[in-house]
Image (cartoon, coloured by chain):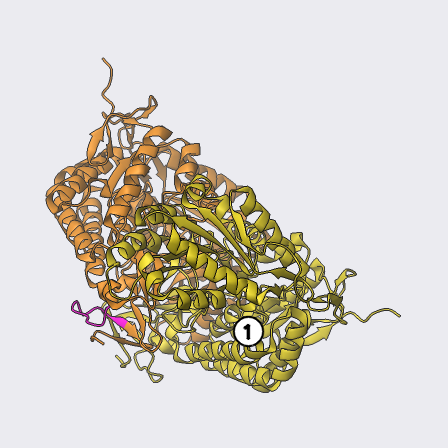
Chain colours: A yellow, B orange
Amino acid sequence: MTQTVQPVLCNGEWIVSSGSNTFQAANPKTEEPMPQTFPVSPWDEIDRVLAVAAATAKEMRGWPGSRFAEFLEVYADEIEARADLLVETAHQETGLPVSPRLKDAELPRTTNQIRQAAGAARDESWRIPTIDTGSGIRSMYGAVGPVVVFGPNNFPYAYNGIAGGDFAAAIAAGNPVVAKGHPSHPETTRIFAEAALAAIQKTGMPKGLVQLIYRTSHEDGLKLVSDPRIGGVGYTGARQTGLRLKAAADAAGKPIYLELSSINPVFMLPGALKERMEAIADEFKVSCLMGAGQFCTNPGLVVIPAGDLGEAFMEAVASRFEESGSATMLSEGVRQNFLSAVSTLKEAGAAVVTGGTAGGGTGVCVQNTLMRADAEAFLKNPHALQTEAFGNGSLMVTADSTEQMAEIAEQLEGNLTGSIYSDTRGTEDADAQQIEKVLRTKVGRLLNDKMPTGVAVVSSMNHGGPFPATGHPGFTAVGVPGSVTRFGMLQCYDNVRHDRLPPVLQDGNPGGAWRRVDGNWTQDQL
Amino acid sequence: MTQTVQPVLCNGEWIVSSGSNTFQAANPKTEEPMPQTFPVSPWDEIDRVLAVAAATAKEMRGWPGSRFAEFLEVYADEIEARADLLVETAHQETGLPVSPRLKDAELPRTTNQIRQAAGAARDESWRIPTIDTGSGIRSMYGAVGPVVVFGPNNFPYAYNGIAGGDFAAAIAAGNPVVAKGHPSHPETTRIFAEAALAAIQKTGMPKGLVQLIYRTSHEDGLKLVSDPRIGGVGYTGARQTGLRLKAAADAAGKPIYLELSSINPVFMLPGALKERMEAIADEFKVSCLMGAGQFCTNPGLVVIPAGDLGEAFMEAVASRFEESGSATMLSEGVRQNFLSAVSTLKEAGAAVVTGGTAGGGTGVCVQNTLMRADAEAFLKNPHALQTEAFGNGSLMVTADSTEQMAEIAEQLEGNLTGSIYSDTRGTEDADAQQIEKVLRTKVGRLLNDKMPTGVAVVSSMNHGGPFPATGHPGFTAVGVPGSVTRFGMLQCYDNVRHDRLPPVLQDGNPGGAWRRVDGNWTQDQL
């Protein structure tokens, strides 16, 4: 019996894929293939989807934000109506725990993000409406055009190409989305697409607002992100693939927002360990092992004091790591990459304190892994010792002094986050400052006395950072309205007749949008 | 006698270049070389400049905006103190008229831009300070690192690498600048450097704040924009060179802001011509021929009604073009590019109405050139017929209907500007809207009843647009604070102790900066 291949979502219809290549995801706990088979879309199918997206973008030009807000809000409801199915499916496809992770943390975060984006679409804050009364010139951000969103393997909901932050931001900015599902959780993605389609129907939005393909060839992926019909791209995933897509999109002049890799350095000053070593070891363990450590903000590098204090801290962490034993990873590919990174780190001079090998648990699992190196080794080989081991592991580097910690910070690549722990009495303020001065320019989010996992969805969040953490240091993937503005183009109106201006730029301001008028922010009308 | 080669400005000293290649600019009016000889800087010299820039960036980390504001304001004064010399020198190097262009328009605009950037550095508006009181998270933009600024040939002041908009924006964001002068006006650039050095001395700023080189090899230019020590790049100039620099910077993950090319389409609805043809012909002539048409916002493509009305308009323009005769261009290279573009347009099906050849005036000159094609020809060959003829010329395309005008708009590449003229009684509103719906997504600045030259320096200006007009549709090169924010990185503080926060993010807000607090803009303290 031939297996039925799941259709792709094109222009509001589930259509049979025209391609002949297919794939199946696997359950990482059982290592068995999942029952559904999904298509690899060939170029003619992608081309059809792009044509629909372009026509949809044209159709929606100038539509009020409230229409996109309404869609997003109904979509959030439709997701919640499918919560049980989404949780069960994602659990099978990713091995991530049902509770609290999938059910109580990631799914609520996802609908919260969608609703926040809806809020920005409605209040038009993402547009940064700007008026200079003396010049006859007014400007705002408007929709950039169809956005292609690639979701990663590690967040089946919150970064999913059809439901995550980039998706919600692109829609809130008034753009159709071409979602590229991640092949490790296609069925979860398909359920989101059903929910999106229901929301499209309920809100009377164009059928081409949200379309879904599951997989493409590498070559077609490059064509997709550089196609003249698209306006921009959002990508979260592995660095190597991301860099290839970046090169293609850059050459075509298409804005591409990427989240690529990060080892999230944590600097541990001695006073903090003296004061509260056990508590910090607990915090670190949770941050590093949660979700099998498969977080973009996993603390993968910890710089600690050399000597007894650092040794005691490593021991405290190692015993906690051993106690929890091992963790099931998202896929065999993720496990192989993790083990290969461990090898690279060992070759570069790191030693395994605990873990470091596959097995010890259920399915595609690997031992919780703690590695160590000293500052001298790190400074001799800083590039290799920053290899990201994506998973339940971390490298601790012992440093003799604050100066040496700062030297290590100098060698860091761009990261999403960087943390500094110091004693709470302020006696290490000068040391903290010395490290911060260097670390600040290397990371998007700087933390004090806090582990980097846990990305609050607030307007001041920066889930971004200098290359190669992302492709541009000025953008955040999380937080409204900033993440929405990314998917806009700056549109200036010069001497344009008043009745032809977009409503948010007209004198009256019935929605009470915040506007920058002659340099001052106001919700008033002119 | 060996000619003395002008030194380069490195770390506050005028140093003898270590290179052996040199160049001279030419006076386009006399076609004689200018007396000064300038060096092509070899890599070891660029490397030295970059090392200084990196050390300077580190030294200035966390400095208050007021220091950069003070420098910029004193620099503006120093420029004004050298106004006569700057005007005379730029006139010789560029052939641009002393008055009103250089003396009364461009130089005052330049110091105005510098002072506006100083204002943003002082009021911190470019930082977009954002606070969420419930989360302990706060963010703002901070300096991105040393910025390399490449100035173009056509604005010896307002876009100069050491005095123009990108320069002022980069400094206002707290970054050192490595200026790359344009080889067609090196002596003008040198005088600016003298003024900058004086301002550095008077304000006690680091000597590495502003450095100057005049020219590099192509290969070294690529190395320069992708060097790990830089934070970003500003480039205004020719498309081909810009695209090479973009590829190099993109591959290294360095933000690069480019202004590359634009033909600034103007759509002329019949009612406008019926109502005020002579006035529009006057406007168009001024906009198209001013500065020998060497403006990035020159109206290079005009879509007009086919038939008697369009013919009469072309005649009215042709007679004005013939009356002014010809114009002296910036350099022989610019003239050759213009003539080559005219050839390309002819080969693609355009016919010369008037002009089209070199000569007819003083020095490196070319006749004012008007060309024509019909919509059918344009739609058959839209790419070639969008060739930018940078100079005193324009292509008029006759269209049979509003639909055909919209079809032409569909074929446009990204541009800085697009204009729509219609009658003033509103009877053509539907036609204007039909064109605008397409044109809006293709241009950064949309105008009504106004020619595109004349870029007001106001916060709502967008001097930018979709690729290939620039490298990213979300940024403007003119207008504060937007242009300044480009040279920042987004810096988030998560759980950072209050006394370690940058002052503008602390609870008290003594400077009264506008901050987004829990989604609302306010100048209040918390």
x and y percentages locating residue B277 in the rendered image: 35, 62
- What is the span of residues highlighted in magenta in the rendered image? B506-515
Closer to us: B28 or A56: A56
Residue in the image at 44% along x and 42% along y: B245
Closer to us: B516 or A109: A109
Quadrant, the C terminus of chain A: bottom left
Chain of the residue under the numbered disc 1 shown in the image: A
Q: Is residue A495 magenta?
A: no
x and y percentages locating residue B319 in the rendered image: 35, 49
Residue in the image at 38% along x and 50% along y: A307
Position of A229 compared to A118: left or right? Answer: right
Q: Quadrant of residue B366?
A: top left
Closer to us: A123 or B361: A123
Closer to us: B329 or A140: A140
Magenta region, main secondary structure: loop
Residue in the image at 34% along x and 33% along y: B46
| Up/down of A29 relative to B298, above or below | below
Quadrant, the N terminus of chain A: bottom right
Q: Is residue B514 magenta?
A: yes
x and y percentages locating residue B510 in the rendered image: 16, 69
Amino acid type of the residue tagged 1 in the rendering: Glu
Residue A232 seen in the figure? no
Q: Quadrant of residue B279?
A: bottom left
| Up/down of B235 relative to B137, above or below | above
Q: Which residue is mark 1?
A: A59
Label 1, secondary structure: give it.
helix
Furthest toward the top, the residue is B1
Position of A357 compared to B90: left or right? Answer: right
Disc 1: CA contacts within 10 A as few (<14), some (14-19) or many (>=20): few
| Up/down of B54 relative to A246, above or below | above
